[in-house]
Image (cartoon, rainbow, N blue to C red):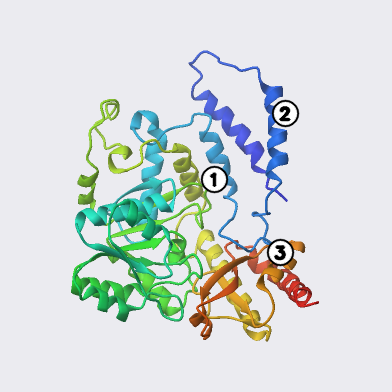
Amino acid sequence: MLEKDTINALAEAVGLLERGFAALPDVRTGETDRIKDVLGEVAERLSDNYPYFHPQYAGQMLKPPHPVARAAYALAMWINPNNHALDGGRASTAMEREAVAQIAAMFGWKEHLGHLTGGGTMANLEALWVAGLCQPGKKIVASAQSHYTHERISGVLRLSFAKAPTDCRGRMDPGALEEMAARGDIGCVVATLGTTATGSVDPLPEILALRDRYGFRVHVDAAYGGYFMLADNLAPEARAAFDCVSEADSLVIDPHKHGLQPYGCGCVLFRDRAVGTFYKHDSPATYFSSRDLHLGEISLECSRPGASAVALWATLRLLPLVSGGEFAQNLAASRRAALQLHQRLSADPRFMTPFVPQLDIVVWALKSGSPERLFQEAARRNLHLEMARLPGAFFGSTQDEILCLRSVLMKPEHEHWLDRIWEILNEAAKASTTP
């Protein structure tokens, strides 16, 4: 079940890499047997995991990296480049710049300032740090369904933070936001394009219109949903939000989610290159190998894995970020799977569904019975779901919160496995109601 075809290609590539350093004297270690033993132990330990790689894992935002990303990352680890300064990773720095430029181009930005990060949290921290410097003394606002990292980051940065209410589909309420903005103390609004709980897409056109009126910055947190920019089957409201991302001041996307990359690989982008002046600093031991800009000079992080850039670059060579391409078609397949599962759940009297998925995340609740037991019965049959607490208002209920079941159908294979997933879910639902 595990993909192994790239192992031979990786071994051949290691030989090619070695020839690039043929002028150096040989250095060998004699620990092959011991390494084999330890790796055997590692394999045994790692088997104590949910099968994240399999379509029957339909729970959290977890999927394996693309084989080419996995192999390219491993190949780079024979050198272990550091993308902080050019002398730590000349080739991988160039590859990072090229890969980041392709991501920026996907959103319509030819001019930008940006780089890879250790993940979405660090990327969002940099964006909110810049926002705080651009609008000192003013607060950060995100929706009540935004990722908790925004409130936590605001605390770290000592910035005031407030949550804007959402509508019944988990989207930021523009009317409520305008009431908050009228007070004149908002410095930045975070628009989420793909909330982690429900995949909801905030109404970015309306938020941008309020920016023009009230003068706050707009940061787009597209850590989860950003790559759906390329999907051709979004509903009109979601499509309208993605189509105006280029008007935002900054954005974040996580290639280690839909971008098929290993953890951790995030990306932060700014529309205005002038914000690079906020990063200016001196370092007595780096930045001497070239007068060209080092990535560490526009990043809050110091040492960063060049292997992440190599893996992303290789993936984009194989699967370019173009409309109608293989990568885009896979995103559309994930959304189709979510829509089909939602349709089946909505037609089943045992379940309640709050709204049509905007991306590829499906949430539903039981009309009676225990969601915990359904979760357990599904897991016993090797269907792995997830649970989430959502506002009762999403389901037309007066309860403050409802414990729901949740599936992230982010593997394109989910579309073809949907009949099997539904068969197991049906069996688990019956078993969960049996005394």
Is any part of residue 336 visible from this angle?
no
Task: Give the residue at x 50% y 63%.
Answer: 328
Left or right of residue 47: residue 256: left
Q: Quadrant of residue 365?
A: bottom right
Determine crowd level at label 1: few under 14, some 14-19, many 20+ residues with C-alpha closer than 10 A.
many
Q: Nearer the viewer, residue 112 or 174?
A: 174
- Disc marking residue 37: 2
**Residue receiving disc 1:** 69
Eyeballing the image, is 275 above or below 82? Answer: below
* Residue 154 pos. (x, y %): 32, 57
Task: Describe the element under mark 3 as helix, strand or loop.
Answer: loop
Q: Which residue of the protein is positioned furthest toward the top in this rendering?
A: 25
Horizontally, residue 173 falls left or right of residue 199, namely: left
Instruction: Reply above or below: 192 against 93.
Output: below
Q: Amino acid at mark 2?
A: Asp
Q: Amino acid at mark 3?
A: Leu
As drawn, which residue projects farthest toward the right? 435
